[in-house]
Image (spheres, rainbow, N blue to C red):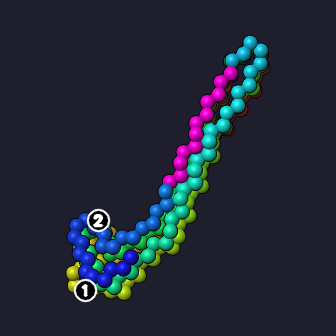
Amino acid sequence: IPNLDTMDTNGKNSWGMVGASIGGGGGMGGFALGAGAALGGSVSVTGGGAGGSGGNADFADLANYGTIRVLGQGGAGMLAASIGGGGGMGGGAISADVALGGAFTSATGGNGGGGGVSSTAEARNYGTIDMNDDGATKSLAFGTQGIVALSIGGGGGMGGMSIAGSVTGGGSITDSVG
């Protein structure tokens, strides 16, 4: 994205030029519920669905050939960001059995999705970034920055929870992995 003219910002946290590519977040895995009831033995096995992967971000590119004036506190002249999307949360699972005999009960939560990949972020200045209204590229306001370029990969999704339980008149095996 090029700037060929003059941009003026004034006010707290105001930004001169912003270009970003942000990947979408992954979807949540499906929830699973299993139950069994029997006079003899009973078996219940459930598994939550996996979370979707976060989307990848593309290249973010800014070029200033003109003038950017940033007079407010906490802003920046240029911000380029490439941010991968976060992974989706794994689905939960609940499994329960009631039996007069024995029971095997198992619940496994789904895996969280992987985070998206970021790409290159470039902010190139061939002109002027004026942060104190006198033509100099220096900052007088607290927290103000001339150029910021960020490339941040997306975080992975959280695994799904699980609950398993059984009530029996005989023996039981219960397994729960979240």
Q: Which residues are magenta?
A: 25-36
Mark 1 lies on residue: 135
Residue at image mark 2:
13
Question: Which quarter of the image is occupied by the N terminus?
Answer: bottom left
Name the residue rendered at 39%, 70% in the picture: 19
Identify the disc placed on residue 148: none
At 37% across and 83% down in the image, what residue appears?
125
Query: What x and y, as percent, mark residue 7?
Result: 26, 77
The answer to whether the residues at label 2 and label 1 have Cβ atoms under 8 Å apart is no
Q: Amino acid at mark 1?
A: Gly
Determine if the magenta segment contains residue 21.
no
Q: Neighbour class for label 1 at 10 Å: few (<14), some, many (≥20)?
A: few
The answer to whether residue 65 is left or right of residue 43 is left
- Magenta stretch: includes residue 27: yes
Q: Residue at x 53, y 52 (%)?
A: 26
In this rendering, the answer to whether 24 lies above or below 68 is above
Q: How many numbered dots are placed on residues in this image?
A: 2
Residue 144 visible in the picture: no
The reply to whether residue 40 is visible in this rendering is yes
